[in-house]
Image (spheres, helix red, strand yellow):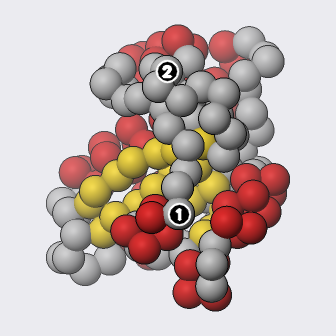
Amino acid sequence: MNNKTHRILAVCLGNICRSPIAHGLLIHHGKRLGLTVEIDSAGTINNHAGASPDPRSIEVMKQNNHDITSQISRIIKQTDFEYYDLILVMDQNNFNDVCSLAENQNQKSKVHMVLTNKEEVPDPYFGGDSGFKKVYKMLDEAIPLWLTQGAG
């Protein structure tokens, strides 16, 4: 990535578990790499709009010295396709849902699976703390590749 401001949106189902972790890690790694980035996150469903990240997401980030407590869940909106340069989704269902909202091929071309091997980031919502640790590790490995190599 060059020196211009890169706008990146992370998307998962409810925007309380995976995408808040990705959001925090995109900010962290962007700063660490000296990049100018503008980051946000959103969900494909409206169930948690206005809510803070899941306490387990907050905790796993806190354990790794990141603070995501100021994030607020929102649903993806049509204007996101024009505003953001890159939309990183967590799983195939999110990919399909986000692509179905795109109005043209240019908008669709901005949507990518966050894991470069096209694997999915599992939703840890109904599991225990270990699922959140796994999600953190997966995203912490994948996100620097997006920021340094435009992975995909």
The x, y position of residue 109, in whole percent, is 60, 81
Q: Nearer the viewer, residue 68 or 82?
A: 82
In the image, residue 58 above or below residue 140? above
Residue shown at 73% from the left, 26% from the top? 124
Rendered image: mark on residue 18:
none
Helix, strand or loop at label 1? It is: loop
Q: Nearer the viewer, residue 103 or 32?
A: 103
Quadrant where the N terminus sits is bottom left
In the image, residue 47 above or below residue 35? above
> From mark 2 to mark 1, how far is it between C-alphas?
21 Å
Q: Which residue is mark 2?
A: 51
Q: Quadrant of residue 19?
A: top right
Residue sitting farthest toward the bottom? 105
Mark 1 is surrounded, within 10 Å at the Cα level, by few (under 14), some (14 to 19) or many (20 or more) other residues, namely few
Quadrant where the C terminus sits is bottom right
Q: Nearer the viewer, residue 74 or 33?
A: 74
Q: Is residue 114 visible?
A: yes
In the image, residue 120 above or below residue 1? above
Q: Point out the tag, 2 or 1, that comes first from the N-terminus.
A: 2
The x, y position of residue 99, in whole percent, is 70, 69
Q: Which residue is mark 1?
A: 78
Nearer to us of marks 2 and 1 is 1
* Amino acid on which disc 1 is placed: Gln
Q: Quadrant of residue 114?
A: bottom right
Residue shown at 20% from the left, 76% from the top? 4
Residue shown at 56% from the left, 87% from the top? 106
Query: How many numbered dots are placed on residues in this image?
Result: 2
* Amino acid on which disc 2 is placed: Ala
Mark 2 is surrounded, within 10 Å at the Cα level, by few (under 14), some (14 to 19) or many (20 or more) other residues, namely some
Residue shown at 54% from the left, 29% from the top? 49
The x, y position of residue 8, in whole percent, is 41, 61
